[in-house]
Image: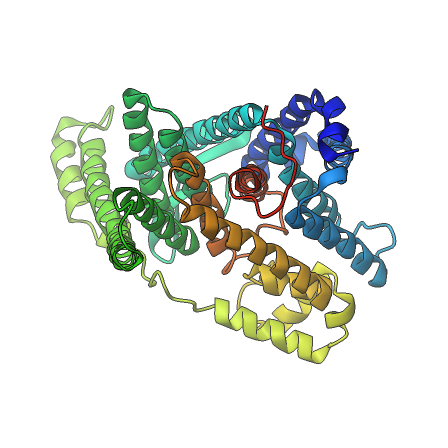
C-alpha cells in the first residue's frame, strides 16, 4: 500500500489539524503579550485546557504524519525524544523541571511542522494566508499604538493589563509591550514585516499591495524604535533578501556571473541602506516627539494663559536627556555581553564535561554560568540556540539540531534561487521569515527554548515551506497531496 493510499482516509482531518494549530498560535500570541501581567495572575486555570490541547495536537501530528515523515521532521522528533531522555538522565523523572521547554517548545513545535505538510496545496495556501493575516493584524495594532505612544511619550493601558508605551534603557527611549524585552517585541514586528511582504506577493490586487507595503514600512519603523539589535539585523537581512529576489526576477536568462555580481551589489547596498534607514527613522521620530512635547505643553488643559509660553520655552530648552532620545548608544554590530556569555558557557562545560554526554537542567547550567560573572545581570539563556542546545542536551542533541538546521537552510537556498517558472515568487518569500528567525537565534535562544510567537511562527512557516519545497523541488517522492 502506498503512502497516498494510507493518507486518503485522513484528508478530512487536515482542516481540523490546521484549525487547532491556528487556535494554539492565537492562544500563544495572546498569552505572550499578557505573560507578565494579567495572564499569570488571573488566568492560570486555563493551563489545564492548554495542556490538553497540546497533548491532542501532538497526538494528531503523530497520527497524521507518522507514515510519511520527511527528513526534517524525523530529526525534530528524534531531538524531542532525546530531550526527554536527557531529562531522565538528569534526575527529572517527572519531566517537571523543564516542563515548558520539553512539552511546549520541543514536542509541540516539532508537531507544528506537520501542519503544512498534511494539507492539500489549496488548504496549505489558505492556512498560511490566514495565519499571516491573523499575526500581522495583531502586530499592526501594537506597532501603530507603540509608535504613537513613543512619539507622545506616554504609556497606553489596554484591557487585561496590557500596556503599550515608552520605556527607557541606557538613555534610549523605545517601544515596550507589557514589559516584554525589546529584543523579543522587535522580532515580533520583524516577522510581521516578512509575512506582510509574503502576503503582498500572494495577492495581485494593487490596492492591497499598496496597503501591505505601507504596513511593512510601519513594521520597519517599529523595529527601528524597538532598538532590539538582533531584530534590526534580522530586518536588514530580510530587506536584502527581498531585493535579491526582485533582481533575480529581472535577470532571468542572464549568465551566472552577471547574476552573482548583481546579487552581491544588491545585498551590500540594501544591507547598508536598511541599516542607515534606522538612523533616519529614529531621527525623524525624535524630532516629531520633540514637537509633540512642546505642543502638549502649549495646549495643556486648565493651564493659565500667561504660563503657557514660558512652559513651552522651558520644554524646548530643556536638557536633551529629558527629551525623547531615539538614539542607541551601542553599535548594531556590538557583541558586548554575547561573547562573555558564550565564553562562560564553554567554561561551564569545561568544569563539568559530563554535560556533553547527558545534557543538563536549564536552572543548573545557567546558575553555574552566571556565577562565573556575578557583576552582570542574571542571564536566562546562552544567547545562541546551538550553544543552548549543547548545554541542555549534550553533543547528541547539538548534532540533531545542527542537522535539522543544515537540511532546512539547504532547502531554503535551493528554493530561493530556483527559477520563477518552477517556484512562484510568493513561495520564495517564505524564506524571509525563516532566515530572519535563524539569524536572530544565532544571538538569542528563542526557538527550541520558549513558547513564544517567534517559535510558533517559525515552525508553522517551516512546515508550509517544506511542503512547497518537496512538492516543487523533489529529490525523492514524499507523496504530498496536490488535490
Q: Quadrant of the N terminus?
A: top right
Task: Please tell me which residue lies in front, 292 or 405.
Answer: 405
Q: Quadrant location of residue 206?
A: top left
Task: Please tell me which residue lies in front, 198 or 384.
Answer: 198
Residue drawn 74% across and 32% down? 64
Query: Residue 112 at what x, y percent from top left?
Result: 64, 38
Residue drawn 54% across and 23% down? 122
Q: Is residue 12 above or below residue 443?
A: above
Instruction: Judge left or right: residue 368 versus residue 333.
Output: right
| Residue 155 visible, this orientation | no
Query: Residue 420 at what x, y percent from top left?
Result: 37, 39
Instruction: Judge left or right: residue 477 versus residue 338.
Output: right
Q: Quadrant of the C terminus?
A: top right
Residue drawn 70% across and 79% down? 351
Q: How is the image coloured?
A: rainbow
Instruction: Judge left or right: residue 77 versus residue 336.
Output: right
Instruction: Judge left or right: residue 291 versus residue 255.
Output: left
Residue drawn 49% across and 67% down? 338
* Number of numbered discs: 0
Q: Quadrant location of residue 88?
A: bottom right
Query: Residue 433 at what x, y percent from top left?
Result: 46, 44
Task: Please tell me which residue lies in front, 120 or 441.
Answer: 120
Query: Residue 398 at what x, y percent from top left?
Result: 66, 63
Q: Is residue 28 above or below residue 367?
A: above
Q: Is residue 423 above or below residue 253?
A: above
Q: Is residue 250 above or below residue 122?
A: below
Q: Quadrant location of residue 167?
A: top left
| Residue 245 visible, this orientation | yes
Amino acid at each position: 500500500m502506498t503512502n497516498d493510499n494510507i493518507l486518503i482516509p485522513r484528508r478530512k482531518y487536515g482542516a481540523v489539524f490546521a484549525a487547532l494549530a491556528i487556535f494554539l498560535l492565537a492562544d500563544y500570541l495572546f498569552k505572550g503579550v499578557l505573560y507578565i501581567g494579567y495572564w499569570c495572575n488571573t488566568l492560570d486555570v486555563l493551563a489545564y485546557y492548554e495542556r490538553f490541547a497540546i497533548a491532542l495536537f501532538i497526538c494528531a501530528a503523530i497520527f497524521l504524519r507518522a507514515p510519511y515523515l520527511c527528513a526534517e521532521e524525523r530529526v525534530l522528533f528524534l531531538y524531542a525524544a532525546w530531550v526527554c531522555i536527557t531529562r531522565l538522565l538528569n534526575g527529572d523523572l517527572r519531566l517537571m523541571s523543564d516542563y515548558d521547554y520539553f512539552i511546549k517548545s520541543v514536542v509541540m513545535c516539532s508537531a507544528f511542522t506537520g501542519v503544512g505538510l498534511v494539507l492539500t496545496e489549496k488548504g496549505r495556501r489558505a492556512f498560511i494566508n490566514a495565519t499571516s493575516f491573523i499575526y500581522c493584524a495583531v502586530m499592526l495594532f501594537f506597532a501603530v499604538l507603540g509608535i504613537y505612544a513613543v512619539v507622545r511619550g506616554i504609556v497606553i493601558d489596554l484591557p487585561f493589563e496590557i500596556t503599550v508605551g515608552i520605556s527607557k534603557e541606557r538613555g534610549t527611549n523605545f517601544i515596550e509591550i507589557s514589559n516584554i524585552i525589546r529584543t523579543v517585541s522587535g522580532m515580533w514586528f520583524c516577522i510581521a514585516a516578512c509575512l506582510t511582504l509574503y502576503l503582498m506577493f500572494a495577492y495581485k490586487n494593487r490596492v492591497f499591495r499598496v496597503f501591505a507595503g505601507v504596513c511593512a514600512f510601519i513594521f520597519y519603523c517599529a523595529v527601528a524604535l524597538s532598538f532590539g539589535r538582533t531584530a534590526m539585523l534580522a530586518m536588514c537581512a530580510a530587506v536584502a533578501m527581498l531585493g535579491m529576489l526582485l533582481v533575480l526576477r529581472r535577470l532571468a536568462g542572464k549568465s551566472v556571473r552577471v547574476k552573482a555580481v548583481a546579487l552581491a551589489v544588491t545585498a551590500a547596498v540594501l544591507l547598508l541602506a536598511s541599516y542607515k534607514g534606522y538612523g533616519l527613522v529614529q531621527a525623524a521620530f525624535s524630532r516629531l516627539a520633540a514637537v509633540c512635547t512642546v505642543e502638549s505643553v502649549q495646549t495643556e488643559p486648565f493651564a493659565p494663559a500667561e504660563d503657557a509660553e514660558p512652559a513651552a520655552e522651558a520644554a524646548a530648552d530643556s536638557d536633551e536627556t529629558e527629551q525623547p532620545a531615539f538614539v542607541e548608544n551601542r553599535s548594531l554590530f556590538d557583541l558586548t555581553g554575547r561573547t562573555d556569555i558564550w565564553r562562560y558557557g564553554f567554561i561551564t562545560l569545561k568544569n563539568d564535561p559530563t554535560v556533553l554526554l547527558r545534557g543538563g537542567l536549564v536552572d543548573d547550567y545557567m546558575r553555574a554560568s552566571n556565577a562565573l560573572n556575578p557583576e552582570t545581570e542574571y542571564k536566562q539563556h546562552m544567547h545562541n540556540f546551538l550553544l543552548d542546545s549543547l548545554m541542555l542536551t549534550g553533543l547528541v542533541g547539538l548534532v540533531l539540531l545542527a542537522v535539522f538546521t543544515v537540511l532546512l537552510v539547504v532547502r531554503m537556498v535551493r528554493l530561493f534561487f530556483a527559477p520563477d517558472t518552477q517556484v512562484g515568487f510568493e513561495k520564495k518569500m517564505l524564506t524571509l521569515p525563516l532566515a530572519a528567525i535563524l539569524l536572530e537565534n544565532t544571538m538569542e535562544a528563542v526557538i527550541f527554548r520558549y513558547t513564544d510567537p517567534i517559535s510558533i511562527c517559525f515552525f508553522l512557516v517551516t512546515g508550509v515551506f517544506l511542503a512547497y519545497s518537496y512538492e516543487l523541488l523533489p529529490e525523492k517522492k514524499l507523496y504530498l497531496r496536490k488535490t
